[in-house]
Image: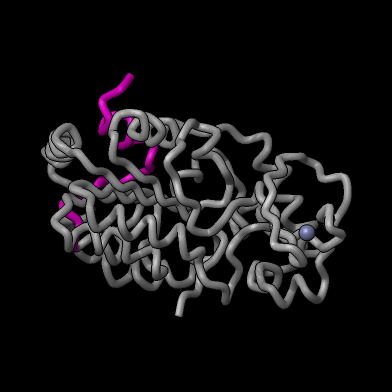
């Protein structure tokens, strides 16, 4: 059973895991050769998969729901990011999404997004699987990408199923309406919903074929996304993890680079 959704509320689980994992000093002191080993492996790689999470966007000041100043009215995301909440009060749920869209619309991709877009251009065999819904990878130039939790910038009609891009901010009316007259919902994955099958299959296929997996800014706690690097590892890929905190993936990663994505990605890809 997967629980996550749409980018945010991982705090409680993460702090528990941190307590367990952080006693190992190895994670606090990556040896000096870790970056060199990683750049070398990346130079030799042919098939690359990248998995990203909220940590990649953190330095673009994408507001988190729970962070300082991030609380939207008095709601918790679990009360808004569900099909039930939307059925009950589509306008309320849309106000929250409109609020997030407004904020993200003024945010620029950072050096980590740009580095990942550079990898997309470098490797003929490449896939980015992101859990972020903010669309910043695309703005940075990433093209071969699956959005495992959907996108804030897409809407889906509840009546006819049509999916459309809509980058307007602010939106002229809430809830937005489809040309067929149906109500549009954000095309994101809500609590209790399954991840888009096709996106997930592409990610699993790419992971199974990859010789290098790069896992950036994700807690690696929530399945099925968390199984992507594990699949790659099993298939023999070299796994590089970049995160500010150790995660359940860390003990099995070949290299763990501890810190913000913007610190490690630019030197890792060796592009100025
Ligand atoms: Zn429709």
Image coordinates of residue 165 in percent, x first then y, are: 68, 45
Could you tell whether 174 is left or right of 52 in the image?
A: right
The span picked out in magenta is 252-272
Task: Give me the residue at 75% from left, 58% from top.
Answer: 96
Q: Is residue 239 visible?
A: yes
Task: Give me the residue at 81% from left, 66% from top.
Answer: 90
Could you tell whether 133 is left or right of 122 in the image?
A: right
Task: Give me the residue at 28% from left, 40% from top.
Answer: 125
Vertical side of 14 occupied by 239: above or below: above
Residue 133 lies in the magenta-colored region: no
Image coordinates of residue 203 in percent, x first then y, are: 37, 56
Task: Give me the residue at 57% from left, 73% from top.
Answer: 193
**Taking the image as four quarters, which one is ligand 1 found in?**
bottom right
Residue 257 lies in the magenta-colored region: yes
The residue furthest bottom is: 1
Image coordinates of residue 62 in percent, x first then y, are: 59, 45
Quarter of the view holding residue 92: bottom right
């Amino acid at each position: 059973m997967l629980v996550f959704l749409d980018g945010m509320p991982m705090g409680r689980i993460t702090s528990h895991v941190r307590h367990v994992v952080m006693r190992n000093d190895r994670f606090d002191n990556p040896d000096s050769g870790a970056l060199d080993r990683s750049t070398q492996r990346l130079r030799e790689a042919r098939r690359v998969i990248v998995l990203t999470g909220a940590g990649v966007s953190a330095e673009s000041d994408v507001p988190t729901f729970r962070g300082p100043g991030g609380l939207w009215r008095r709601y918790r995301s679990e009360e808004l990011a569900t099909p039930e909440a939307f059925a009950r009060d589509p306008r309320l749920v849309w106000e929250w999404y409109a609020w997030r869209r407004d904020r993200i619309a003024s945010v620029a991709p950072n050096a980590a997004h740009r580095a990942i877009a550079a990898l997309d251009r470098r490797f003929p065999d490449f896939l980015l699987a992101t859990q972020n819904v903010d669309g910043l990878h695309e703005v940075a130039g990433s093209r071969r990408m699956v959005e495992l939790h959907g996108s804030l910038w897409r809407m889906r009609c509840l009546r006819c199923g049509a999916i459309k891009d809509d980058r307007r901010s602010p939106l002229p009316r809430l809830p937005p309406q489809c040309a067929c007259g149906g109500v549009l919902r954000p095309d994101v994955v809500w609590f209790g919903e399954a991840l888009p099958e096709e996106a997930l299959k592409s990610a699993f296929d790419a992971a199974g074929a990859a010789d290098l997996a790069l896992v950036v800014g994700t807690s690696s706690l929530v399945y099925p996304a968390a199984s992507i690097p594990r699949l790659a590892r099993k298939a023999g890929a070299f796994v590089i993890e970049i995160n500010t905190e150790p995660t359940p993936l860390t003990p099995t990663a070949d290299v763990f680079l501890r810190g913000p994505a913007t610190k490690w990605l630019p030197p890792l890809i060796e592009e100025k």
